[in-house]
Amino acid sequence: MQDKNMLMIPGPTPVPESVLLAMAKHPIGHRSGDFSKIIAELTANLKWLHQTTNDLLMLTVSGTGAMEAAIINFLSPGDRILVGNNGKFGERWSLVGKAFGLQVEEITAEWGKPLDPEVFRAKLAADTAKTIKAVIITHSETSTGVLNDLETINTHVKNHGESLIIVDAVTSLGAVNVPIDQWGLDVVASGSQKGYMIPPGLGLISVSQKAWKAYENAKIPKFYLDLKAYKKATDKDSSPFTPPVNLMYGLQVSLQMMKKEGLESIFARHARLTQATRAAMKALGLPLFAPDEAASPAITAVMPTGVDAEAIRSTMKKQFDIALAGGQDHLKGKIFRIGHLGFVGERDILSAIAALESTLQTLGYEGATPGAGIAAAASILAKVG
Ligand SMILES: *Cc1c(COP(=O)(O)O)cnc(C)c1O
């Protein structure tokens, strides 16, 4: 059915109508006084959302551009870095680091399992010569639906003292508490099409004083992503190059919506949707890929048995216009992923679960009592509603 498409993937995420309408305007000059006011408002509201007084910079890139900026501005070729890799995005950080000649040491965990903070503690404690320049953690590993224990790993980085902590918060920011200042997170990268409720195209990055000190010694060449240029411009409510003006109209509205809802409520909503989704999958006998204690607030990965993951996805798409995400790399065809990030409410989750139950019946799956998924989700939503 035309215009009935429902995005339940972890990015791009659904966009509110008021945001879409805000973007449907003529662009204005990005050097105008009117646009300066918009940049000032966005910067202030983004700092609120990121819980930080650090510099908060907007880049015209996807999330990966913000990842690249996080590496090339603060490190030099040959620098030793520790990268947590338990999925596609952890792996991407390694690839970016290697592309720029860094000495990348991976700390891995099986896909679907969280990183073990103890391994970071031991590596950092053994580094008495202080050769580790940065530790990079993907907070919410979107490919597997795992939330890594950033808080604990960060404590070990703080005990090391020298190393920067660089965080991929692309699917955790705006979904779960990431208190940048309280935890002392040096560089935090994210992207607009995830928790910010706007389309793709804007990369966000926050930079601490300690990271700016590292910037002074960083020798990787850079131009478009040289963050000092963004800082200088942002300090004057401006932008070094032409920014995505219309996307920023949208961000104005989405941030106003988030402020109205409040951080605590936003986090509570994501926790509720995650719990309801997970309870439903359990009730339907569909195995969850990530453990309860490390469940991403943005995405639930499911590894069905007795029914084909890709058949589920194509039936959901064909019959219900609901887009679910599939698995990546070796998980292709083995898992499906339900996104519940950003502009997603309880009604969306109930619709998706009901459609999934119907899909399971269509596919002849016999592992579940009809209605069991909805009943389980409803009881979670009733408890907190
Ligand atoms: C989406 C995402 C990114 C960035 O991907 P882009 O396609 O470049 O926007 C980075 N890390 C994680 C964890 C993500 O989910």
Image (cartoon, rainbow, N blue to C red):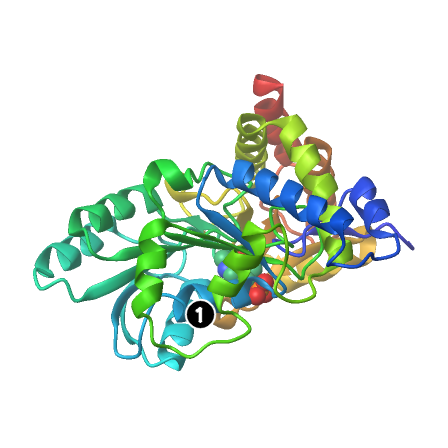
Task: Left or right? Give the position of 169 relative to 357.
Answer: left
Question: Toward which corner of the image does residue 337 lie, by quadrant?
Answer: bottom right
* Nearest to the observer: residue 74 or residue 282: 74
Which of the pair 259/325 is nearer the observer?
259
Q: Is residue 96 left or right of residue 359?
A: left
**Compared with residue 259, is residue 324 higher up or lower down, i.e. above or below?**
below
> Quadrant of residue 348 in the image?
top right
Tag count in the figure? Answer: 1
Mark 1 close to ligand 1, CB under 8 Å: yes
Q: Which residue is mark 1?
A: 92
Q: x%, y% of residue 300?
A: 54, 47
Q: Residues within 10 Å of mark 1 (few under 14, many from 20)?
A: some
Where the N terminus falls, by quadrant? bottom right
Relative depth, front residue between 360 and 243: 243
Residue 77 pos. (x, y %): 30, 79
Q: Residue 253: x, y in percent?
A: 74, 40
**In the picture provided, is 77 more to the left or to the right than 144?**
left
Q: Tell me if I can see residue 244 in this picture.
A: yes
The amino acid type found where label 1 is placed reads Arg
Q: Position of residue 107 (x, y in %)?
A: 27, 63
**Quadrant position of the C terminus in the picture:** top right
Q: Residue shown at 61%/49% (left/top)?
A: 338
Dot 1 falls on a residue whose secondary structure is helix
Residue 247 is drawn in which quadrant?
bottom right
Any part of residue 335 in sight: no
Answer with the quadrant where ligand 1 appears in the image.
Answer: bottom right
